[in-house]
Amino acid sequence: MLSAVPELGWGQNLIRLAVAGALGGLIGLEREMRDREAGFRTHILVCVGSALFTIVSAYGFRDFLTSGDQVVRADPTRIAAQIVTGIGFLGAGAIIRQGLSVRGLTTAATLWVAAAIGMATGAGYYPGAVIGTAITLIALWPLRILAHQIIEAVRPEEHRVLVELDPGTSVSELLSALEREQVRVESIELEDEPDRRVVTLTLDQSTEGLVSFVSDLDFVKAVQWRR
């Protein structure tokens, strides 16, 4: 009966944690090279931590499970399952809103994937961990470049400006300022939030120096040019 409860020796522990660190480091290195919020060391720690949690969940309580006259039955995934929930808090910390932009979504996703790779490695499922790492690296690098090229080729050329205003600021003030600069606006989209008002302007053509001009207006909090 005691032999029915698996155990993991020093060698297997070393291999699984080392592989988890290496695979997590590969993803983290890509993030580090792009100067993202969570980089090389963070991804290693997430991957190794997830692997260790999985190992502890499956093998760490062998002495307790085999104590007494009978083997105590338990779910080997009871601790590892909480990683999926817990990693969400770490990923949320990597997401940052800077004015009109939101950064960190991809980095949060890579932390989530690193946790999954660590769990697979900790469980000894090396093919899934290696393939998952390879697909993640392809998605972060070659596919990003390819997707950008396809979108630029398919999407019609537009000249859009995103302007963040103080809450309650009238859009007419912005339009009047643009009219004085002889800027033609084709369409306007307005989005109100509790702490800001975002106006999306579609222009008929690119206007040199427009972003600098709009950002200097007193009632404008931020400006972003999108083509």
Image (spheres, rainbow, N blue to C red):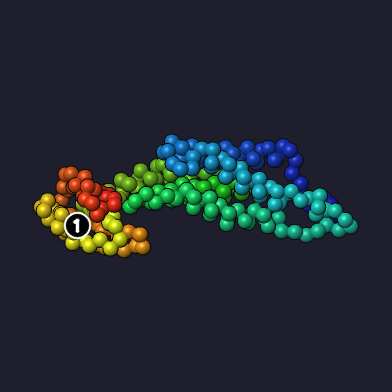
Residue 187 in the image: above or below residue 40:
below
* Residue 47 in view: yes
Q: Nearer the viewer, residue 33 or 123?
A: 33
Residue 206 in the image: above or below residue 25:
below
Point out residue 170 in the picture as x, y percentages from the top left corner.
Answer: 22, 62
Q: Is residue 84 left or right of residue 191?
A: right
Name the residue that disc number 1 marks.
Answer: 174
Residue type at mark 1?
Leu
Q: Nearer the viewer, residue 122 or 94?
A: 94
In the rendered image, the quadrant that contains the N terminus is: bottom right
Q: Nearer the viewer, residue 135 or 27?
A: 27
Point out residue 42 in the picture as x, y percentages from the top left corner.
Answer: 53, 41
Mark 1 nearby-residue class (10 Å; few <14, some 14–19, many ≥20): some
Q: Is residue 50 left or right of residue 175?
A: right
The residue located at (64%, 40%) in the rendering is: 17
Point out residue 154 in the picture as x, y percentages from the top left corner.
Answer: 26, 52
